[in-house]
């Protein structure tokens, strides 16, 4: 099943626009787990168990694993998610951006080693840096467009000679010339709802990965109004609204942290769903 089809199925099955970002920080683990990087898999797997029926996708951030030499734990975690939640898409947040054989190897890492359904990419080197990922049939390539960080404006808001801003050009390329495979999406931050709306205007049907609700302060209802498109039931412009820290670290007790994560995820899903059906 392609990434786009799997995304649509998970949205329907779980009635959810919520993506849980798996960004494990051992220093923030609860109780006796705190500071123990060998327990990254255990920490994340418990979150998966308690949220898998509430989410549209899971999004592990590769740096949080690699920084602790925990790539084997990441492989094990992704295999576990495929086992217990086979219909939930896996987006590897890697933000790769290279060309040629190096890009081919990165694509192999993502789609063969980790068997993710989609990956985040930087488009700064142009289509050459995206095309190797599109050779993997049905896999998603989610391209940075207007990111949630304030410094993103340094480049993404630059006006081009055409009158477009750079992020608008990226959105246009992604929906037109680059998207022959039909598997490209865009990253747009929840902290900039006006820009989400503009990207959606340019790219009416592309999946939008939208980080920034929760700890970063993005407004969930404004995000849905700006980005999701559909008739109340049928989605024509999907969004993947990601929250990480607000869910992962909702509880500080080792015995109940996964239950606290479930409660936080359930509240976020409900808020997003209320905005979608309003």
Image (cartoon, helix red, strand yellow):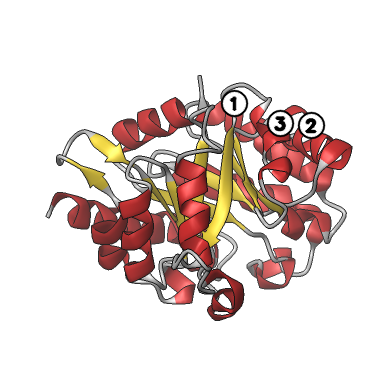
For disc 3, the neighbor class at 10 Å (few under 14, some 14 to 19, many from 20) is some
Nearest-to-viewer mark from 1 and 2: 2
Determine which of the numbered discs, if any, sits on residue 189 in the image: none
Query: What residue is drawn where x is 79% and y is 63%?
Result: 36
Q: Nearer the viewer, residue 259 or 74?
A: 74
Q: Are marks 2 and 3 in contact (CB under 8 Å)?
A: yes
Q: Position of residue 233 (x, y in %)?
A: 18, 36
**Label disc, if present, on residue 111 of the rendered structure:** 3
Tell me the CA gap for discs 1 and 2.
21 Å
Q: Quadrant of residue 23?
A: bottom right
56 relative position to 76: left or right? left
Q: Which is nearer the eye, 164 or 127?
A: 164
Q: Is 253 on the left or on the right of 241, as rendered?
A: right
Above or below, 256 against 133 in this view is: below
Which residue position holds label 1? 83
Mark closer to the observer (1, 3): 3
Labelled pair 1, 3 in contact (Cβ < 8 Å): no
List x then y, in percent, for residue 79: 68, 31
Residue furthest to the left in view is 278
Residue topped by disc 2: 108
Query: Does label 1 or label 3 sit earlier along the sequence?
Result: 1
Vertical placement of residue 32 versus 2, above or below: below
Residue 48 picture location, percent across and down: 54, 44
In this picture, residue 52 sits left or right of residue 272: right
- Mark yes or no: residue 189 visible: yes
């Amino acid at each position: 099943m392609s990434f786009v089809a799997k995304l649509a199925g998970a949205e329907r099955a779980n009635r959810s626009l919520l993506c849980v970002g798996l960004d494990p920080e051992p220093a923030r683990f609860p109780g006796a787990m705190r500071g123990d990087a060998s327990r990254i898999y255990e920490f994340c797997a418990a979150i998966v168990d308690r949220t898998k029926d509430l989410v549209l996708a899971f999004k592990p951030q590769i740096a949080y694993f690699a920084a602790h030499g925990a790539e084997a734990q990441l492989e094990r975690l992704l295999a576990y998610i495929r086992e217990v939640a086979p219909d939930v898409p896996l987006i590897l947040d890697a933000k790769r951006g290279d060309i040629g054989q190096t890009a081919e190897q990165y694509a192999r890492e993502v789609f063969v080693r980790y068997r993710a359904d989609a990956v985040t990419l930087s488009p700064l080197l142009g289509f050459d840096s995206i095309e190797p990922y599109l050779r993997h049939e049905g896999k998603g390539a989610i391209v940075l467009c207007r990111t949630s960080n304030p410094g993103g404006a340094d480049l993404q808001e630059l006006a081009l000679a055409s009158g477009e801003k750079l992020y608008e050009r990226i959105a246009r390329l992604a929906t037109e010339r680059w998207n022959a495979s039909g598997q490209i999406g865009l990253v747009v931050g929840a902290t900039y709802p006006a820009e989400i709306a503009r990207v959606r205007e340019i790219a009416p049907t592309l999946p939008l990965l939208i980080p920034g609700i929760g700890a970063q302060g993005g407004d969930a209802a404004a995000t849905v109004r700006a980005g999701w498109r559909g008739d109340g039931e049928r989605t024509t412009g999907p969004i993947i609204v990601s929250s990480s820290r607000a869910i992962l670290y909702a509880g500080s007790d080792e015995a109940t942290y996964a239950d606290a994560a479930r409660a936080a995820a359930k509240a976020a899903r409900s808020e997003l769903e209320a905005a979608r059906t309003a």
